[in-house]
Amino acid sequence: MPSPPCQAVLQVSPHSNSFYHQTPLQGFKILKQDQLESNSIVPRTLVFDRCLLPPPISETKKTIVLDLDETLVHSSPDPPPKMYDFVVRPSIDGQIMKFYVLKRPGVDSFLEEISKKHEVVVFTAGLEQYASQVLDRIDPKGLISYRLYRDSCKEMEEKMVKDLSEMGRDLGKVVIVDDNPNAYTLQPENAIPIPPFVEDGEDRELEKLVQFFEWCEPFEDMRLAVKQYFSGGNDGGSSGAADGIDL
Ligand SMILES: [Mg+2]
């Protein structure tokens, strides 16, 4: 069910080159002429819809939504763990925190590969102050198109839920990769579970995911691909494991 638009209205100058404006609500709908106030001097007016992302650049491109913690990286506070790749120092509630971040094996080539053919979005339940610093480090080339943080999650029965229906995308073209099943409570048919990463240097889950997305290419509806794969219909012989890809 589409969410009702909020009341905020953005007026756009006809001379502006920027049709879309990045805002906390990130979503746009063009008002019909008769919805405009008669004395409006601005011919184009937009009202925010509850979309988390701007409209897609391509209607056919699939969108891969990635969780951050325990999916792409593992972070821990002081004391320093044995292994870490870099440190971030976000200011949270006015206090500088220190997190030691370990990248999941293969994360660099994973982002490189999947971003060639897909729109890549990171959707984390983490705070922006922390997660944006981690993403700046793991994505220096800007392969991730959009970043969504905790304030874009829905809190349902004390769970942080990532509602894909608010992304402004055809749900047949979206998948979410997340180690926490709470995240995809609302759209389990779009979900690719991944075992949580903590420190296993031999972890190969992201490599397997690249192969999985190649296998998915012929599918127009990603929900069918996910269903077929996890019901054991893939050529790789998955037995329908609920804890990740088994190619
Ligand atoms: Mg996670």
Image: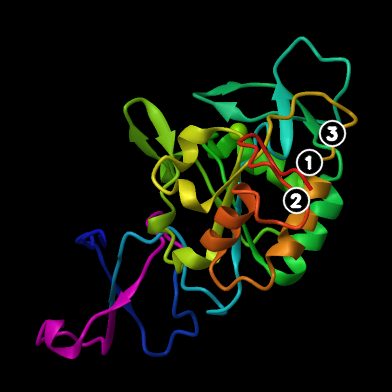
| Rendering coords of residue 156 (x, y %) | 33, 33
Side (left or right) of 72 relative to 176: right
The amino acid pointed to by label 2 is Leu
**Marks 2/3: CA–CA distance:** 12 Å
Q: Which residues are magenta?
A: 22-45
The amino acid pointed to by label 3 is Asp
Disc 1 target residue:
205
**Residue 1: within the magenta?**
no
| Magenta segment main secondary structure | loop
**Marks 2/1: CA–CA distance:** 6 Å
What residue is shown at x 78% (from left), y 55% (from top)? 210
**Marks 1/3: CA–CA distance:** 6 Å
Question: In the figure, residue 129 lies in which quadrant?
Answer: top right
What residue is shown at x 70% (from left), y 17% (from top)? 77
What residue is shown at x 35% (from left), y 34% (from top)? 155
Q: Are marks 2 and 1 in contact (CB under 8 Å)?
A: yes
Disc 3 target residue:
203
Of the 4 image quadrants, the one containing the N terminus is bottom left
| Rendering coords of residue 189 (x, y %) | 48, 51
Disc 2 target residue:
209
The picture quadrant for ligand 1 comes to top right
* Label 2 C-beta lies within 8 Å of the nearest ligand 1 atom: no
* Label 1 C-beta lies within 8 Å of the nearest ligand 1 atom: no
Query: How many residues crowd mark 2 within 10 Å: few (<14), some (14–19), many (20+)?
Result: many
What label sits on residue 166 in the rendered view? none
What residue is shown at x 12% (from left), y 88% (from top)? 34
